[in-house]
Image (cartoon, helix red, strand yellow):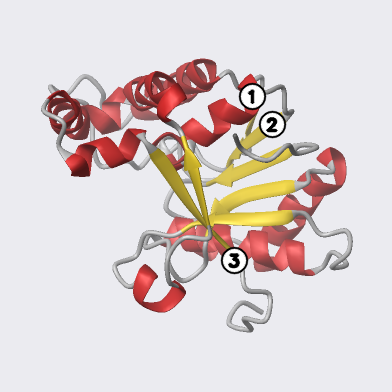
């Protein structure tokens, strides 16, 4: 059973970021009645995949991914979905202060007790890293006694070498169908992976099963001064 929270705020840059990493956790919170908001910063309109076989074009992909995001939110039970309107693959060039203030505005409005996003330095993609930095900068401005908890997804190759084992492991076996449905919703981007994943689950492959049995998070070290 995951911990009870007042309100959970999930912040990721792309549609499907939530499906891969935290959709089981999201569903678990919603099923236990916890208010949850998902702020998706872009529509992922520069995504490299166009479906398998291709059914999207560069012109149609933004609207397709918007609809996929809505379908994924429905699969997880999300009622408060925010599409923040930034442009895919440009977040690293956004003004740092504006990015931080966007996150602060969400926190001030929603008063979450938990924020979920990426861990800076271990999120691989430039948009992921820009999002993580904005979240850390925003949370750092909040007095420690009032600051929401921050649980972060980290998946760089050197994550465990530098951060150790995850601090939090959420058992999502009871909501694995919802997680798979969230991933299926983003079919323009996930078709190839889903083929391999679903076959792996069918034959009880441990590497495939770990996707639908637990989700792992790190708590941020506020003594870390790498993010100013």
Query: Which quadrant would the C terminus be assigned to in this image?
Result: bottom right
Q: Is residue 224 above or below residue 94?
A: below
Give the residue number, with chain letter if any, for mark 3. 133
Query: In the image, 103: left or right of 186?
Result: right
Q: Is residue 122 above or below residue 194?
A: below
| Residue 78 point in image, percent of width and height | 61, 22
Q: Is residue 46 above or below residue 33?
A: below
Mark 2 or mark 3, whichever is nearer to me: 2
Query: In the image, 55: left or right of 70?
Result: left
Q: Is residue 6 above or below residue 217?
A: above
| Residue 151 point in image, percent of width and height | 60, 54
Q: How many marks?
A: 3
Q: Residue 206 sits in which quadrant?
A: top left
Q: Which secondary structure, mark 2?
A: strand
Neighbor class of circle 2 (other Cα within 10 Å; few <14, some 14-19, many 20+) is: many
- x 62%, y 73%: residue: 221
- Tell me whether the residue at label 2 lies in contact with that at label 1, contact meaning CB atoms closer than 8 angstroms: yes
> Between disc 1 and disc 3, whose residue precedes?
1
> Between disc 2 and disc 3, whose residue precedes?
2
> Between disc 2 and disc 1, whose residue precedes?
1
Disc marking residue 30: 1
Give the residue number, with chain letter if any, for mark 2. 36
- x 47%, y 32%: residue: 24
């Amino acid at each position: 059973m995951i911990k009870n929270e007042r309100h959970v705020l999930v912040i990721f840059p792309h549609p499907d970021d939530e499906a891969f990493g935290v959709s089981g956790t999201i569903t678990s919170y919603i099923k236990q009645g916890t208010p949850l908001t998902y702020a998706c910063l872009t529509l992922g309109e520069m995504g490299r995949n166009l479906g398998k076989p291709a059914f999207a074009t560069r012109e149609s992909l933004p609207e397709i991914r918007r609809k996929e995001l809505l379908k994924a939110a429905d699969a997880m039970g999300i009622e408060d979905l925010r599409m923040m309107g930034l442009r895919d693959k440009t977040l690293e060039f956004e003004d740092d202060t504006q990015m931080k203030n966007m996150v602060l505005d969400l926190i001030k409005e929603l008063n979450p007790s938990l924020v979920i996003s990426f861990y800076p330095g271990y999120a691989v993609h430039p948009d992921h890293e820009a999002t993580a930095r904005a979240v850390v900068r925003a949370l750092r401005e909040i007095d420690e006694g009032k600051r929401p908890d921050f649980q972060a997804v980290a998946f760089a190759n050197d994550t465990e070498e530098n951060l150790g084992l995850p601090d939090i492991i959420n058992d999502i076996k009871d909501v694995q169908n919802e997680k798979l449905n969230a991933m299926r919703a983003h079919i323009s981007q996930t078709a190839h992976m889903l083929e391999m994943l679903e076959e792996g689950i069918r034959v009880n492959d441990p590497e495939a099963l770990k996707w639908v049995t637990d989700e792992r998070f790190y708590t941020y070290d506020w003594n870390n001064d790498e993010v100013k």
